[in-house]
Image (cartoon, helix red, strand yellow):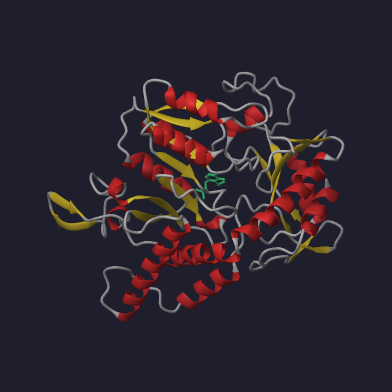
Amino acid sequence: SGPPVAALVGQGLPVPCLDGVRRPYADLDAAASTSALPAVAERVADVLPWYSSVHRGAGHKSQLATAAYERARADILAFAGRDPDRDTAILCRNTTEAVNHLAHRLRLDPADVVVSTAVEHHANLLPWARVATRRFVECGLEGTFDLAAVVAALDARPAARLLAVTGASNITGWLPPVGAMIAEAHARGVPVLVDGAQRAPHLPLPPEADFVAFSGHKMYAPYGAGALIGPRDAFADGEPFLAGGGAVEFVSLDEVIWTSPPEREEAGSPNVLGALALGTAAAELPALGWDRIAAHDRALAQRLRGGLAAIGGVRLLGPGLEVATLPIATFLIEGVPHALAAARLSAEFGVGVRHGCFCAHPYLQRLLGLDAAGTRRFRDAAVDRDRRGRPGAVRASAGIATTIQDVDRLLEGV
Ligand code: PMP
């Protein structure tokens, strides 16, 4: 199984448990957010004395900040495997904002079809509901679909204007066949957005995707910085997502000449510190070695999912153990409400997990075998529900700093 790939800032701090013992925190909530890499924390501390307004200041600090900001953008673009001559990284807050940005920017007609999947996080579902007609690739009880279902959705008429798919599920860790999906979409002239939020900390992002969105806080940088990557041309014309300072060449009281991307898409003062943190994580993560990260992930996924599946009364949601996934496991414990299970894991064992429906309600419904069409049988099915009647489960998820001992403490608690 080997040691963790890297230590993170604040990792393993002691947390108080009900028996009075302080246990080192076993953070099994990496799919929600990750702690920072030491290099990221150092970068933020180094920059604090001199951060300054980018692009428009003539002073020395502004020049330093501008150079560092543009260097971060280049590192983020390289992390996504993109061509700096053709592509750009629009720096934003997070994946949610990036997808909303693209949904606004593509200027779709409400009748235009966006092909998406039942596996998506709300961040890649709701923005498309506002601007287009959606056609879904369905998944089965195991939470997966095959390429033939994607091809059928792409071949249905009217033709799709976009394929929007996640690079990895935040509930099951399942990895849709994004490479083959992109090839099928491109063969039909359909561009592709990959929601890279979960994939980015574990695997290289597919460079052939037209658009990719991801968040710093899931890849070992703090909150408030994310990226939308795409061809510069896609943002060269038309109104930008946000209107304001920094996005313009020239303004009169009744006219505006917008500047070129990426500045055209980044109106307002940007999160310079956040961008530098994300840029540092984007440079550090591949340097740790994707092969090492993959081997670590494989070992943790086996211990986590295999260990849970072997416990009587535990129901692991999603694909069977023979299917490789990210080190994420979502499960139910027979007779123990999910909120209670998560609270006890924290209070008695110092294990941090998440519970609920994980911002992917349609997918969780399907994994639980509830009415695939919506919420009709919502209140009848015999599933664990919260006070508002919503179903839920417990999720444990691991990252580069997770140890086998962390996973074993969870298994012991369960
Ligand atoms: N997509 C996926 C697959 C996610 O897991 C998440 C975060 N849970 C998001 C999108 C949204 O990320 P953010 O909250 O950083 O916008």
User: Residue placed at 74% from the left, 64% from the top?
Assistant: 3
Quadrant where the C terminus lies? top right
Is residue 360 shown above or below 219?
above
Q: Give how far across and how far down residue 390 sits, in percent.
A: 65, 31
Does any portion of residue 14 appear in the rendered image?
Answer: yes
Please determine whether, in this image, residue 197 is positioned above or below residue 119: below
Residue drawn at (61%, 62%), measured in percent from left and top? 35
Q: In the visual, does 36 lie left or right of 282?
A: right
176 lies left or right of 108: right
- Quadrant in the rendering for residue 306: top right
The quarter holding residue 168 reads: top right
Residue 389 visible here: no
Quarter of the N terminus within the rendering: bottom right
Tag count: 0
Say which of 379 and 208 sits in front: 208
Q: Position of residue 157 (x, y in %)?
A: 39, 20
Is 25 placed above or below 181 here?
below
Taking depth in this image into account, of 131 and 18 the one nearest to the observer is 131
**Lateral position of residue 30 relative to residue 155, left or right:** right
Question: With 307 as the anchor, is 226 left or right in this view?
Answer: left
Q: Is residue 112 above or below residue 59?
A: above
Q: Position of residue 372 (x, y in %)?
A: 60, 22
Residue drawn at (65%, 60%), measured in percent from left and top? 292
Residue 148 in percent (x, y) is at 54, 26
Q: Hey, which quadrant is residue 86 in on the image?
A: bottom left
Q: Nearer the viewer, residue 379 or 90?
A: 90
